[in-house]
């Protein structure tokens, strides 16, 4: 399937509604440095510097779907506690319907706290109960599901083994969804896949499939046989097995199966990749795409998400960008267009990310730009760069500028690791985009000290800060053009 065909399918996607049922988890990351051993016991002492709350479990699937502009509602169990209220807030902050989340006063909200020093996780603390919901609550949950499933185009059952997806609930929910003509996708847990009997498909990774089948799936032939056996075991229409760095394998009942190799440019972190896969499969099947087409799009999305750090999502703009990439230019899926900008900013906020914004023309990228962007990125968790379009560059810089058209400038900027996302604007100043983003940190060069930084008042009035970046002397696009025309001496070389 060509990228042009995939791009056309993405364009025609619409905004289908997906119902997610499963285990909601609040993921907390506490980061800092270990500088000494405790005098109380031979254990490290973590000097905590930062705490971050993210949506985990079924919530991360929901976040992936919202990033792709789907309509999403979630059903799950929350404790009658502050963590449950916080988890609901994170979901609602990105536009997820939570009225299907019930409170079980007898259980804590599931929380996983990870203690991290540098890049090393040194401890994980889990607060959870794996007990099934009390029978009256479980009956109410199933009745509520039957009332909601009719307005969904797909159902995702996200099973993390925390008690929501009991055998009784599955036995009632799957037939109800299938009777309504709604596909049911399962992210499975444990070794007994017969409990998912009648679902449309399951999406285990290789290790999970091996556990369910009781044998190794080392070769592609073994994976093919394994997918076929999973379909028969649970009376499925299809099976999708994710294979890590080898991509994914998908098979429909009675079909030969297909191996889709990985499309990742680089792998930084595989956290949450399985959630991305099932979210994009659900989106495709909700839009009535053939499984092969939905799987190809999901594979491209997974290739993007593993190139990011931490649990992340992929926007339509990013996916559209990577499908348009001809392998030489393109923006590696980092350009946020239209509503994708607001959706991504909302997702970052829900994940507790510290957002840094800066802007410029970035016509001829030079060492000064690279140092400046690296400095900006160091001031937070994600860096969004606003880029002037060609017409606004001409107004600001005069005839003959930009030297490089917008597509080329975006492609070069997207290749920098410091840059997490790009947004194009056509105004003479970035004030409008600053207001749309409302970053935690606004960065400009120190040459703006006496000019007045555009957007300063807005950012500071919303609790943010403005930081002036040091500039690398003698580096500018204008001086490069003057040297190229022979009107200026060569730039000084650094000593040493």
Image (cartoon, rainbow, N blue to C red):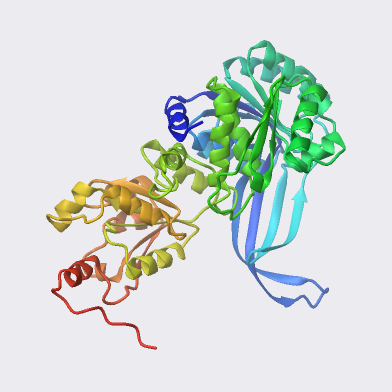
Q: Residue at x 68, y 14 (%)?
A: 178
Q: Is residue 118 rendered to the left or right of residue 466?
A: right
Question: Between residues 342 and 488, which one lies in front from this camera angle?
Answer: 488
Q: Quadrant of the C terminus?
A: bottom left
Number of numbered discs: 0
Q: Is residue 216 rendered to the left or right of residue 1?
A: right
- Quarter of the image for residue 373 reads bottom left
Q: Residue at x 38, y 66 (%)?
A: 370
Task: Examine the rendered structure and indicate whether residue 350 appears above or below residue 183.
Answer: below
Question: Between residues 318 and 446, which one lies in front from this camera angle?
Answer: 318
In the rendered image, residue 60, in percent from the top left (x then y), is placed at 61, 40
> Does residue 166 show up?
no
In the rendered image, residue 199, in percent from the top left (x then y), is placed at 72, 21
Question: Between residues 236 and 122, which one lies in front from this camera angle?
Answer: 236
- Quarter of the image for residue 232 reads top right
- Quarter of the image for residue 100 reads top right
Residue at the right extreme, as displayed: 214
Q: Residue at x 18, y 55 (%)?
A: 401
In the rendered image, residue 409, in percent from the top left (x then y), is placed at 31, 53
Task: Examine the rendered structure and indicate whether residue 49 appears above or below residue 212.
Answer: below
In the rendered image, residue 105, in percent from the top left (x then y), is placed at 75, 35
Q: Is residue 433 rendered to the left or right of residue 333?
A: left
């Amino acid at each position: 399937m060509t990228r042009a065909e995939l791009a056309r399918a993405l364009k025609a996607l619409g905004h289908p509604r997906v119902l997610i049922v499963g285990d909601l988890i609040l993921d907390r990351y506490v980061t800092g440095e270990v500088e000494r051993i405790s005098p109380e016991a031979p254990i490290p002492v973590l000097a905590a510097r930062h705490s971050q709350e993210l949506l985990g479990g079924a919530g991360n699937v929901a976040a992936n779907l919202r990033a792709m502009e789907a309509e999403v509602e979630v059903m799950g169990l929350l404790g009658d506690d502050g963590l449950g209220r916080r988890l609901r807030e994170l979901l609602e902050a990105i536009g997820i319907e939570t009225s299907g989340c019930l409170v079980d006063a007898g259980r804590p909200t599931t929380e996983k706290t990870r203690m991290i020093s540098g890049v090393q996780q040194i401890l994980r603390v889990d607060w959870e109960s794996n007990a099934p919901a009390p029978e009256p609550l479980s009956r109410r949950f199933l009745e509520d599901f039957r009332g909601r499933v009719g307005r969904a185009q797909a159902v995702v059952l996200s099973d993390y083994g925390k008690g929501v997806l009991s055998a009784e609930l599955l036995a009632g929910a799957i037939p109800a969804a299938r009777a309504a003509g709604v596909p049911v996708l399962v992210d499975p847990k444990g070794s007994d896949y017969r409990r998912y009997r009648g679902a449309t498909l399951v999406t285990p990774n290789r290790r999970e499939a091996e556990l369910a089948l009781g044998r190794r799936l080392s070769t592609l032939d073994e994976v093919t046989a394994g997918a076929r056996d999973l379909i028969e075991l649970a009376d499925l229409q299809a099976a999708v097995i994710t294979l890590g760095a080898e991509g994914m394998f998908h098979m429909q009942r009675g079909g030969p199966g297909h191996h889709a190799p990985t499309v990742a440019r680089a792998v930084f972190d595989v956290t949450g990749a399985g959630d991305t896969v099932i979210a994009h499969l659900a989106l495709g099947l909700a839009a009535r795409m053939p499984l092969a087409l939905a799987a190809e799009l999901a594979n491209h999305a997974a290739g993007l998400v593993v190139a990011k750090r931490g649990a992340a999502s992929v926007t339509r703009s990013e996916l559209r960008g990577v499908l348009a990439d001809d392998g030489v230019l393109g923006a590696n899926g980092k350009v946020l267009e239209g509503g994708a900008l607001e959706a991504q900013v909302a997702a970052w906020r829900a994940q507790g990310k510290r957002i840094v914004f800066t802007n410029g023309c970035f016509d001829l990228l030079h060492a000064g730009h690279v140092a400046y962007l690296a400095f900006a990125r160091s001031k937070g968790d994600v860096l969004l760069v606003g880029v002037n379009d060609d017409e606004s560059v001409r107004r600001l810089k005069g005839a003959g500028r930009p030297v490089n058209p917008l597509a080329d400038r975006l492609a070069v900027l997207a290749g920098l690791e410091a840059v997490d996302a790009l947004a194009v604007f056509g105004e003479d100043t970035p004030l409008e985009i600053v207001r749309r983003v409302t970053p935690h940190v606004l960065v400009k060069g120190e040459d703006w000290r006496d000019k007045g930084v555009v957007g300063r008042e807005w950012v500071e009035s919303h609790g943010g800060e403005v930081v002036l970046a040091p500039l690398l002397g003698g580096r500018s696009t204008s001086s490069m053009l003057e040297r190229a025309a022979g009107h200026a001496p060569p730039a000084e070389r650094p000593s040493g």
